[in-house]
Image: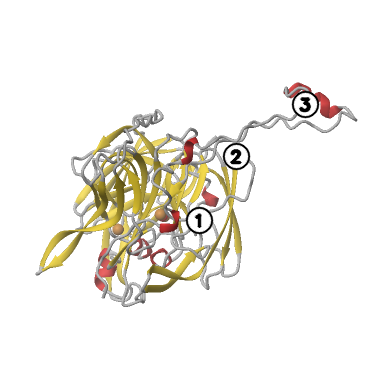
């Protein structure tokens, strides 16, 4: 059996090292037609007059192109209008080309793996024409996007899309940041088989870096070239499915990236594994954390190691201070001689060329610190597990195993403290749909995580408190993002009532 290996970027997406992000690529000059008067009043008047000649289109100049992101190939926006991006997305069975000598039957979006990288600008309307060509029902959940509940892909709100059917997702993206999408029906199987992709919402004025890279991090469990049957073993029911092959952007060993000494890049990371918390570091380059689930941080910070619970994202600002090979490393727990040790695996290499390039300071836009307030209410989410001789292991929140009705009701705008209480050994990455929260620091690396989040790791035998501002009305799922736990019961809903 193949051991765990590492990844890098899709070779085809890699261009010369100095191609950089195209944030400054030549603006298309807007040439006004020979015009009479572009004022609104004049346009209205003109339109009222017959024989006024062709109407003058008082369109604003086109927006500069979005930064180019090196990583999974990007979806093509079929709508030429500014302010609207329109994509198609089709789920079907595909062959996952994990390596030259390793092809695995799985699922893909748009015949690719990972699914296409979606990009929009904050405030854009997004239209996705989704088709389900699988032979089972599915939905698309837009993880982290604070969109209307009907568009969120929750099978409690949206009837799953049946085989051969279509659904139009349409929403406005209110926040800039790094997000992702995946199914919310039998998610432990559908995500593991390959249904996931990154969704980048760019800032209104994106900071300009020498390059931007996307890293979709996964692990997959293989038996030869087969994905084994699901939930068959006790360890999988207890801890979720951990893979034996690490994948970066769908590849076991992705092609190395290319960069230049002195350059500064933006890296976007998402952990889409079923269960594995990724523990990452960077060798041969230095980074600071500039963004998290909810977008850019008010105060970026430096760290050596970064824990990415499943579902979480981080944006890094990567500096190449010297030529050589930079490596993104995942520190993986493996059993060697009966003992658990941490072994480093390379996820991605970047060859850094010598160069004159002086570090260009990147000006990050001012991010607003999260709005704090006094929590008006405190609720507890208590996690536990029970073994049943009939159904195997079940996972529960507040003693409930996938209840039909929301377990808490709030009013829109409520500021709520949620105590996440875990009295067992297994960790749980807790995810709340449709809202952001802040993690109340508790002195552990898992909880020293500033910024807005939608997912937080609750380690074994611990309590973590979060503060959520519930601004987005609707019925929202709250669940463990270890997908086996979620599908084995650890999935509830809350309801945010719109009182206006
Ligand atoms: Cu990323 Cu309810 O999930
Ligand atoms: Cu869990």
Foreground disc of the pair 2, 1: 2
* Label 1, residues with CA under 10 Å away: few <14, some 14-19, many ≥20: many
Residue 98 in which image quadrant: bottom left
Q: Which residue is mark 1?
A: 153
On the picture, is 404 further left or further right than 381?
right
Q: Are marks 3 and 2 in contact (CB under 8 Å)?
A: no
Which residue is drawn at the image coordinates 37% and 44% (left, top)? 293
Residue 6 in which image quadrant: bottom left
In space, the residues marked 2 and 1 are separated at their CA atoms by: 23 Å
Q: Which residue is mark 3?
A: 43
Quarter of the image containing the N terminus?
A: bottom left
**x, y percent for residue 371:** 38, 30
- SS label for mark 3: helix
- SS label for mark 2: loop
Q: Is residue 405 visible?
A: no
Q: Which residue is mark 2?
A: 83
């Amino acid at each position: 059996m193949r051991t765990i290996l590492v990844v890098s970027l899709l070779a085809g997406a890699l261009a010369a090292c100095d191609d950089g992000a195209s944030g400054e690529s030549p603006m298309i000059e807007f040439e006004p037609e020979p015009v009479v008067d572009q004022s609104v009043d004049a346009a209205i008047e003109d339109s009222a007059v017959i024989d006024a000649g062709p109407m003058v289109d008082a369109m604003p100049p086109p927006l500069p192109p979005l930064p180019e992101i090196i990583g999974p190939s990007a979806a093509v926006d079929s709508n030429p209008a500014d302010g609207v991006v329109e994509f198609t997305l089709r789920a079907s069975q595909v062959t996952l080309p994990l390596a030259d000598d390793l092809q695995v039957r799985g699922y893909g979006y748009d015949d690719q793996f990972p699914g296409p990288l979606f990009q929009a600008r904050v405030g854009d309307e997004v239209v996705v024409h989704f088709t389900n060509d699988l032979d089972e029902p599915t939905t698309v959940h837009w993880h982290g996007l604070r969109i209307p509940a009907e568009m969120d892909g929750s099978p409690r709100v949206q009837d799953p899309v049946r085989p051969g059917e279509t659904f139009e997702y349409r929403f406005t993206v209110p926040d800039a940041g790094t997000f992702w999408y995946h199914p919310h029906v039998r998610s432990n199987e559908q995500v593991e088989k390959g249904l996931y992709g990154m969704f980048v919402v760019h800032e209104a004025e994106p900071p300009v870096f020498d390059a931007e890279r996307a890293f979709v991090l996964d692990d997959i469990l293989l038996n030869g070239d087969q994905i084994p049957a699901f939930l068959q073993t006790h360890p999988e029911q207890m801890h979720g499915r951990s893979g034996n092959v690490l994948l970066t952007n769908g590849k076991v060993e992705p092609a190395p990236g290319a960069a230049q000494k002195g350059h500064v890049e933006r890296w976007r990371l998402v952990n889409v594994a079923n269960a594995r918390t990724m523990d990452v570091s960077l060798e041969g380059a230095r980074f600071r954390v500039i963004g998290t689930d909810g977008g850019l941080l008010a105060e970026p910070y430096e760290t050596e190691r970064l824990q990415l619970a499943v579902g979480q994202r981080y944006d890094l600002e990567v500096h190449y201070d010297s030529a050589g090979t930079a490596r993104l490393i995942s520190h993986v727990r493996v059993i060697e001689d009966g003992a658990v040790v941490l072994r480093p695996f390379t996820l991605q290499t970047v060859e850094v060329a010598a160069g004159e390039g002086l570090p260009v300071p990147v000006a990050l836009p001012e991010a607003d610190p999260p709005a704090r307030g006094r929590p008006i209410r405190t609720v507890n989410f208590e996690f536990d597990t029970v073994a049943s001789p009939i159904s195997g292991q079940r996972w529960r929140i507040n003693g409930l195993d996938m209840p039909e009705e929301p377990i808490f009701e709030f009013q829109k705008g409520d500021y709520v403290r949620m105590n996440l209480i875990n009295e067992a050994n297994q960790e749980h990455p807790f995810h709340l749909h449709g809202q952001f929260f802040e993690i109340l620091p508790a002195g552990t690396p898992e909880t020293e995580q500033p910024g807005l989040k939608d997912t937080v790791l609750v380690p074994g035998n611990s309590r973590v408190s979060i503060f959520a501002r519930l601004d987005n009305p609707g019925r929202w799922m709250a669940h463990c993002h270890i997908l086996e736990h979620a599908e084995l019961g650890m999935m509830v809903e809350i309801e945010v009532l719109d009182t206006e």
